[in-house]
Amino acid sequence: MDTNAKNTGQYIADLRKGKDLTQQQLADLLGVTNKAVSKWENGQGLPDIGILLQLADTLGVSTDELLQGRGADSGIQGAGTQDAGMQEPAPPAGPPAAEPRRHTAPKRIVGILLSVFGSLGLITQILYFTAGRRLGLVYEIACFEQIANVIVALLLAAGILVLLGARPSRKTAQSLLIVSAAAIFVYLAAAIPLFGAHAVSIIRYSPDHQNKLVLRYDTGTGKTALLKQGILWFAQCRDIFPFTASEGDFKIQWLVDDVCAVTYMSDDDGSIHQYVATYGARGDQAGYTSPYSVVASLGWRTELSGAVWSIETSQDGIGIRQGTETTIYSWQDCVPFGTTAVVLCKDGVPEWTIALNEDCFVEYGYVRGGCSITLCRVSMEKTAAFVFQSTNPA
């Protein structure tokens, strides 16, 4: 072993201990590994020229003193010479130990995967906000727009941190975190106010869970859209309610498993309104185009609280008889929805809703007897639905 290297190494160890530094702390100050410091102190090598000046300055001596190992044999007062038994054990002599290979491959794979998923999400969001919106596509659940924005930003930020920070210094990691946080803030600040921040989704399933009502209410404009299932978690606008809804307060009532009545108040005229969402037909749909023909072709009757109720039709319109009193709703005041529901109005205000039950079957334009319909009063309060049987035999 080189005597000069051994003296220099002992001198470095004494100076380090005199400054109450560990090998790791000295290595961090110099930007090297603790293995390199251990090699110097055990005389297995000398510091490189580029590090020598920094090492001498850190230990408070000149480079000449450091290379001559001055004080290594005469003893230097410090932590390293006060008690030989307290010195750090030196590793056995031999060839210099190689630095352990840092396993960055798994981190890079994780970073690549995060970046790929984040990029795919970003592309999906861009396509949604551009082409998707023009095609009438929206998220079925409105808050998913904001959730998707947050997830995309987090995936991209995490991917960048993992890829660029596989072996980051503390300063580099802090810089990356600041840049990523700023990018996320800018992305969300731009995306949330522009795209659907004021939308609320209302979802209700039919009693048999075969049909789903999806409403999208805009709290800013008061407009309500009826959505239909699209691709994946996206939906398409099926229809727009003709009146705005006051504060998004809706009464939703399934009259039949495929007929849902949505009642709401509107500030447009201060009146109650109703929209009926229908999801099916009755038999041979080609044989009829509206529920009028089914209601008009048969007589309907039920008994409520000891009084006989009936639904009759004439050239004047549809009449509801309660005992001896009959209210006529002109055909102009009857609003059909699909082929299975009709709303009866007075002066533009809805009062009753008729829905064709699933036992109503139309074949070649002919309605079979023995079927039934449902009648329900239009109100924001809780109302019961009444079933009327046809007076014609099956």
Image (cartoon, rainbow, N blue to C red):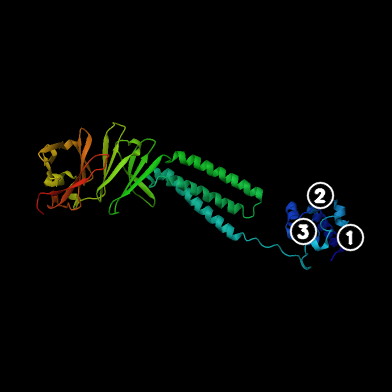
- In the image, is residue 4 above or below residue 62? below
At label 2, the amino acid type is Asp
For the residues marked 1 and 3, what is the alpha-carbon distance in whole angstroms? 20 Å
Q: Earlier in the sequence, mark 1 or mark 3?
A: 3
Mark 1, mark 3: which one is toward the viewer?
Answer: 1
Q: Which residue is mark 3?
A: 37
Q: Quadrant of residue 44?
A: bottom right
Helix or strand or loop: what does disc 1 sit on? loop
Looking at numbered disc 1 in the image, what kind of residue is underneath it? Asp
The residue sitting at 46% across, 38% down in the picture is 193
The kind of residue on which mark 3 rests is: Val
Residue 312, percent from left and from top: 11, 42
Say which quarter of the image contains residue 91: bottom right
Which of the two labelled residues, at mark 3 and mark 2, occupies the earlier sequence position? 3
Q: Residue visible at 60% across and 47% down?
A: 176
Query: Of residues 23 and 94, which is closer to you in this image?
Result: 23
- The answer to whether residue 117 is visible is yes
Q: Residue furthest front?
A: 306
91 and 310: which is toward the camera: 310
Residue at 12% across / 49% down in the picture? 390
Q: Nearer the viewer, residue 58 or 306?
A: 306
Name the element at disc 2: helix
Rendered view: 251 above or below 42: above
Q: Residue 203: percent from the left, percent from the top?
A: 34, 47
Mark 3 to mark 2: distance in Å?
15 Å
Q: Disc 1 designates what residue?
A: 73
Give the residue at mark 2: 57
